[in-house]
Amino acid sequence: MKTKTLKKNKVNVVTLGCSKNLFDSEVMMAQLKANKFDVEHEAKQDDSEIVIINTCGFIDNAKQESIDTILRYVEAKKEGQVEKVYVTGCLSERYKSDLETEIPEVDAYFGTRDLPRLLKTLKADYKHELVGERILTTPSHYAYLKIAEGCDRPCSFCAIPLMRGKHQSTPIEALVNQAKGLAAQGVKELMLIAQDLTYYGLDIYKKRNLAELLDQLADVEGIDWIRLHYAFPTGFPMDILDVMQNRSNICNYLDMPLQHGSTNMLKAMRRGTTREKTEALISDIRSKVPGIAIRTTLIAGYPGETEADFQEMYDWVEKTRFDRLGIFTYSHEENTHAFNFEDNVPDQLKRERADAIMELQSGISYDLNQQKIGKTFKVLFDRIEGDYFIGRTEFDSPEVDNEVLVKKSDGYVRIGDFANIEIYQADHYDLYGKIKD
């Protein structure tokens, strides 16, 4: 029995997981809108006829969140709050047959590259002329730009190639056209994303071509900041640092997931590098682009990680002093190379090791932030929260990095605009500043 009248042709798209999934949802929403659907992203009310859940299947916590979300909408369907529930994305790509058996109430499951089939199920056409078009779910002044799909790296712990397939670069001209379209909509900041930015171009240009892409994107009028996410350290194309130095609108920021600081663990993880090579690379990057902010991601509790391996990583983090750092506890993923090994670090020990690294990083972040007091930074403002305007410097990406807080009582800034801010106070992850005339 239906409990409410559902809005016909209204689709609620729910996105879980990373920015690459968000990009895919934005593309899907543009296709749906072009097919005359009323589309909403993560609608607050259950009044949509159709719900499409774009799932994540990266690690245990993400998989559980995806399953819980599917079950929540299946329950809503039973209660008459939605008519159709469709599931797409990484979890569905990886576990489709299991999900069909365990949660048969879902109307259909689709993989990561099944958008045309999903649209056909909804009696909609895949409109090729819309390739590159998206409905932005981010604030209107910044957007993610996915420059490649899939990954060719052999990392032992990672299931992404199982879900996303082989590396596939998007041609430069298509990306430049997308950037121009986003700039015309008022986007000022582009965050370049891929499973592996530094592999860009090898498949279609037979060389690493990220530097040329950056140079052309930097020419797009209206784009003030370009930010690099998810660069792989092995085979790092140093020429991108020349472009970063020469082009003022490429942020002095690099997100480079390094995963561990022990050579033993890096070898076991099949990362193709050593701690010593990693240290040399970071040193070269910092000497070539002084003041660059380096963000990294690490894993605690990989199979066989000894106390000595962990201590080596801890000491390395303490010595390297990353500007930004996040850490995951190891997740034992089926069909990965590491699944052949015993997951022999207890969960509690994994968490303790991760917590120890984050406590260390908190102190490093505090020290680095104290050095910013009295300095003036160009800040892009994202939102208003309570009594504060909240923005970011070029050294910070949305949602994962530090923020700059300016009291409303100290002056006015418009969301989506830049302002020069003098920092007068700093804590572990936030800076407090005043507008500089």
Image: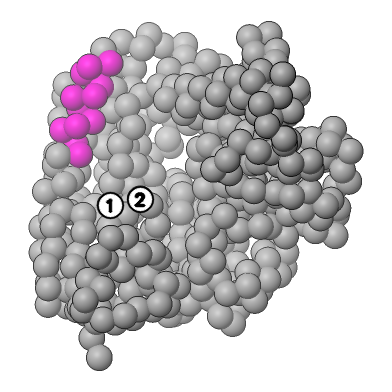
Mark 1 Cα-neighbour bin, 10 Å: few <14, some 14–19, many ≥20: many
Q: Earlier in the sequence, mark 2 or mark 1?
A: 1
Q: Give the image location of residue 306, x and y in percent.
A: 21, 19
Which label was assigned to residue 324?
A: 1
At x 51%, y 22%, the residue is: 68
Q: Nearer the viewer, residue 255 or 12?
A: 12
Q: Give the image location of residue 85, x and y in percent.
A: 70, 27
User: Are the residues at dot 2 and dot 1 in contact (C-beta closer than 8 Å)?
Assistant: yes
For the C terminus, the quadrant is bottom left
In this rendering, the answer to whether 41 lies above or below 350 is: below
At x 83%, y 52%, the residue is: 36
The residue segment tinted magenta is: 347-358
Tally of marks: 2
Helix, strand or loop under label 2: loop
Kind of residue indicated by mark 2: Val
Which label was assigned to residue 400?
A: 2
Dominant SS in magenta: helix
**Horizontal relation, residue 259 to residue 37: left or right:** left
Which label was assigned to residue 421?
A: none
Q: Quadrant of residue 151?
A: top right
